[in-house]
Image (cartoon, rainbow, N blue to C red):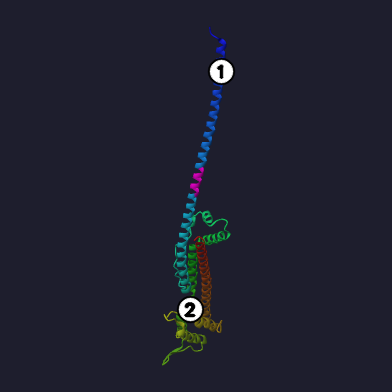
Amino acid sequence: MFDFNLIVQEAEKMTSFWSFSQNWFDILSLVLTILSLWLAFYLGERGYKRDKKDKAKEQKELIKSEVKLFENNLGQLNLAIDSQLKALEKYKEEQNFSLEFNPDVQVDFLKFIDVKHIYEAIGFKKEDGIGKVNSLFAGLYSLNDFRHSLRDSVRTYISRYTTLEKRFYLYRKLMYRMFHEICNRRTIDVRRSPQGFQVNFGDNEFAEKFFHHNQAVLSNPDLLNENQVVIREKLIELFIMPLIELSKQFIPVDEDAIEVSDIANEVNAAWIDMEVVTKAHFNEIEGHINSLEKVKTEITTFLELVK
């Protein structure tokens, strides 16, 4: 016969065993899950730190290479500035309307430079270094329109000067054409003498004085330089100004004196304006020279800083 009580007891034991086994499996699953999560977190954090370290290294190399490129560009710019300064000094000395322009005096390379990287390379906490970098960039940005500004300055000066020069050249009309016209109209008699020609203007005192003044100036060796070119300052001093004073004495009686005075005053006014625009232009050129020298100093200071 079967012992049902014994069977029931054995069944309870089996139930208790399976209940314990199920709890143990749940605990083990939970532990494995926690370990998996921790391992995933650990590996992820490790990968993140490695990537971060690699990116920091790459960023450092990028900054280093960009600063090096920036230094090379500054070196090239410095050479171009030296060349342009020599050309400007020569132009200022000779004043011959011929200025050599160096196309490399430009800061287009700033478009490809991350300014923040330059500051990072110097160090944001270095106030002295930051100040020098600020001065450098201020100088560089001032060259943005340097080429156009310089060309416009020279072009405008030449245009204004040549316009005034056309009025100044009216002295030729006084010295040659009007001289012959007045002589032909006012001469009464001409006689040859050992000293040349003796011209008789009768009672026309202005024509006589104008004739002798013109002859004296044309024979004056101080009027021409070693290349036999008229010295403009001497022309004004020896010919135009005395002629203006001479004409005043016969105005308004003598029509020739009136015309000579008008032309002589126009020549003198043109000369004064030529001198004014020349002085203003070369003051501007001096400003360009000072700007380039300042930028050159800032570049040299920066290159010393990053050594």
Q: Is residue 100 magenta?
A: no
Residue 53 in picture, x, y percent from top left:
50, 47
Q: Secondary structure at mark 1?
A: helix
Q: CA distance from mark 2 to mark 1?
A: 133 Å
- How many numbered marks appear? 2
State the residue at coordinates (55%, 15%): 10
Residue pointed to by mark 1: 13
Which residue is situated farthest in the top direction here? 1
Q: Is residue 8 above or below residue 141?
A: above
Main secondary structure along the magenta-highlighted residues: helix
* Residue 183 vs residue 28, the one in the foreground: 28
Residue pointed to by mark 2: 232
The magenta region covers 48-56
Q: Is residue 34 above or below residue 147?
A: above
Q: Give the image quarter of residue 8.
A: top right
Residue 204 in picture, x, y percent from top left:
51, 87
Q: Are marks 2 and 1 in contact (CB under 8 Å)?
A: no
* Residue 245 vs residue 39, the one in the foreground: 39
Residue 254 in picture, x, y percent from top left:
53, 83
Residue 83 in picture, x, y percent from top left:
45, 67
* Residue 223 vs residue 94, the one in the foreground: 94
Classify 10 Å Cα crowding around label 2: few (below 14), some (14-19), many (20 and above).
few
State the residue at coordinates (47%, 57%): 68
Q: Is residue 210 above or below residue 146?
A: below
- Which of the two labelled residues, at mark 2 and mark 1, occupies the earlier sequence position? 1
Classify 10 Å Cα crowding around label 1: few (below 14), some (14-19), many (20 and above).
few
State the residue at coordinates (48%, 66%): 155
* Residue 42 vs residue 142, the one in the foreground: 42
Q: Give the image quarter of residue 119.
A: bottom right
| Residue type, label 2 | Arg
| Residue type, label 1 | Lys
Q: Secondary structure at mark 2?
A: helix
